[in-house]
Image (spheres, grey):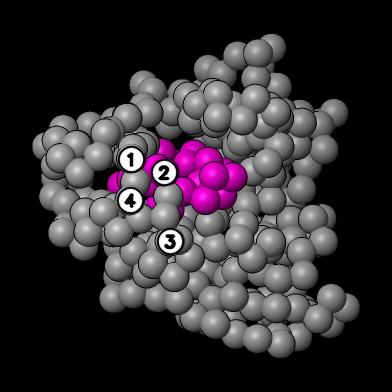
Amino acid sequence: MKNSKKYLFFILSFIFLAFIPTTYQAKELIRVSGSDRFQTALEISRKNIEKSERVIVVSGDSFPDAVSSSALSAENEYPILLTKKDRIDNDLLNEIKRVEAKEILIIGGENSISKSVENELSKVAKTKRISGRDRYETSILVFEYKKELNPNSTKIFFASGKNFADALVAAPLIYNEGSIILYDDGCGIDLKKYSPSLIFGGKNSIPGFDEIKRIAGSDRYETSLEIAREFNSKNIVIASGENFPDALSGALVAKKKKCTNCLGYER
């Protein structure tokens, strides 16, 4: 545990970190950050995207719906932009115009992003809202939408819907195979229709499923390292393990750099 934690740096925003494969010593360090979570998401888009047919807009205050969009972002290189529930910033609208998006995908219901914000977004580009009755159904609907765009992207990966960490770490690595579906006991998902091929996180997060392969560590930080090792990642993006928006926006960066998210401490 202690040996693993010494590789996790004090970080409040994204960095790219290239590892020497056997010793995990940093070769190159690049920080991408803004004045807050909303500006960090914008800065990541500015530094990585020139044009995008679609952008994804999610709540900057609630993780479940946002987590579901991470694999969709990574596969298609759609930037993820964060908004407040009832107010939209001009910087966000300007970024949508800059990338020349033709469609805005709003992930989550009106309790997360209000109708008034949707109306403002619709003045910039066509909008499509993807939302279910809860976080679990929303993750399924995002999976089905992603499958429409890429019929080969059919595998299902489970991660807990009660925390953001495992799903966001895994998304950049599985994007071309399928999507993360959020799952917890009693969530009502039809396991005959949506059966996982891999589970991210330990038995405390998702109990049962003894016959399914699982990638897990003793906590979210070690789980992120185990996922990096499993997929033989030579480069990683490190983001706060306590603050979901940075790790969310980093899914696109991790995909473009062919690496994974790892989680670090804020203190």
Q: Is residue 245 above or below residue 103?
A: below
Measured Cα–Cα span from mark 3 to mark 4: 9 Å
Whether residue 168 appears in this view of the structure is yes
| Relative to 228, residue 15 above or below | below
Relative to 101, residue 36 above or below: below
Task: Give the residue at mark 3.
Answer: 50
Judging by the rendered image, the residue that carries numbered circle 1 is 102
Q: Which residues are magenta?
A: 53-80
| Residue found farthest to the right | 22
Disc 2 marks which residue? Answer: 53
The residue positioned 44% from the left and 28% from the top of the image is: 138
Label 2, secondary structure: give it: loop
Upstream in the sequence, badge 1 or badge 3? Answer: 3
Element assignment for label 3: loop
User: Which amino acid type corresponds to the residue marked 1 in the rendered image?
Assistant: Lys
Residue hosting label 4:
100
Q: Secondary structure at mark 1?
A: loop
Q: Residues within 10 Å of mark 2 (few under 14, many from 20)?
A: some
Does the residue at mark 1 contact the one at mark 4 (Cβ under 8 Å)? yes
